[in-house]
Amino acid sequence: MVGGHKPRSGSLAYYPRVRAKKQVATFSTYPAITTEETKALNFFGYKAGMTQIFGKNSHEKSTNFGQETCIPSTVIECPPIRIIGARLYAKTNEGLKVLGEATVEKPGKNLRKKIVSFKQKGKKNKEGKKYSVFDDITKLKEKATKVVLLAELQPGHTGIGKKKANVSEIELSGTVDSQLIFAKEKFGKELKITEVFDNNTFIDVKAVNKGKGFQGPVKRFGIKIQRPKAKKHRAVGSIGPWHPATVMWTVPRAGQMGYHTRTEYNKRILFMEGNPETINPKRGFLNYGVVKSDFIVLSGSVPGPAKREIALRPAIRKTQETRVKFTDLNLPFESEAKEEKKAETKKETKEEKKEAPVEVKEDKKETEAKKEETKEVPKKAEEKNEAKKE
């Protein structure tokens, strides 16, 4: 067999390969959802690690239909997000422009450490009372094109050791009026993952992948290593002609590898749970620890190392529903959690029985003796009465 010609590998679709501007990835586009109910279109979580889930394959045309198969899946911890404000945008020739925003009086203490100049803006009316913050926003709704929620991520609810909160925007579906009503309901409250996504649906994932630092062209692009007689071994043989005197961007060169923002499409949600005992291994997840709050389990891998913020949104590309179609799924430690619960309930019942007052059963002899005493007392009283009469 003739050897294939492979001077380089690595996609040229991602250019330039530079470090990401920020670690928390955000989406710029969202799917058009035509539903009457207004709901959030994105959420954020923290990558815990990967695990294996077993289930029966229900895709009829697959080779292992009906058989129990192993699904490599990723666990993402999604603590509730606190809504600290709302912001109105208007379309202009230069793009979107902020019309106004409203924020809560006091955000979380972990956010106050980060944003020192967090102040509450509010005017007073003729009666001397402060306007509601939303009263100022609703006046601008005719000019606005969309309403966005200002969200405070709460990594303190996880076990990663990070407390300083990040602020990001959460997009909403529906009209401007319905978005304002939804924002007013959620103002100062928490938003959970179950309010955004449904079980067994497809979502898109965006994150900054694992950084590998400054690397050479062999590791970065997969070029061949030169023969032993060559002057340089781990370098490109020719970087281009003399004229034009320039190096094309398509030539593999050394540079930054990793820590790039990447998006992966159509990851199915296998589980959305609020009980972390069903997913936590005894030793915890490697480089992460123990999951403490709500979590979701996605089929396949997700970019980024453990503890990295992951942006989630509904799937924007159409996909076949037969992909990753499984039934009778089981979380890895679900049975152990149930057994532990049963053991705890048994202990509680035993303790309750011990604490309950014990009824002491009297012996038959003692009861008979007491009865005889009670009979003798009225007899003595009768004798005394007869003696008095005499």
Image: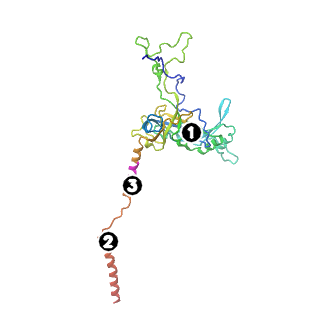
Judge whether residue 108 can be spotted in this image: no
Which region is colored magenta? 341-346
Relative to residue 40, is residue 377 drawn left or right? left
Which residue has dot 1 on it?
A: 151
Judge whether residue 214 can be spotted in this image: yes
Comes first in the chain, label 3 or label 2:
3
On the image, the x and y values in percent for residue 119 come to 60, 39
Relative to residue 201, is residue 369 drawn left or right? left
Residue 343 is a magenta residue: yes
Which residue has dot 3 on it?
A: 349
The residue type indicated by label 3 comes to Thr
Which one is in front, 388 or 17? 17
Which residue has dot 2 on it?
A: 367
Relative to residue 102, is residue 322 drawn left or right? left
* Mark 1 vs mark 2, CA separation in Å: 74 Å
Callout 2 secondary element:
helix
Comes first in the chain, label 1 or label 3:
1
- The residue sitting at the left extreme is 365
Callout 3 secondary element:
helix
Q: Are marks 3 and 2 in contact (CB under 8 Å)?
A: no
Q: Nearer the viewer, mark 1 or mark 2?
A: 2
On the image, the x and y values in percent for residue 118 come to 59, 38
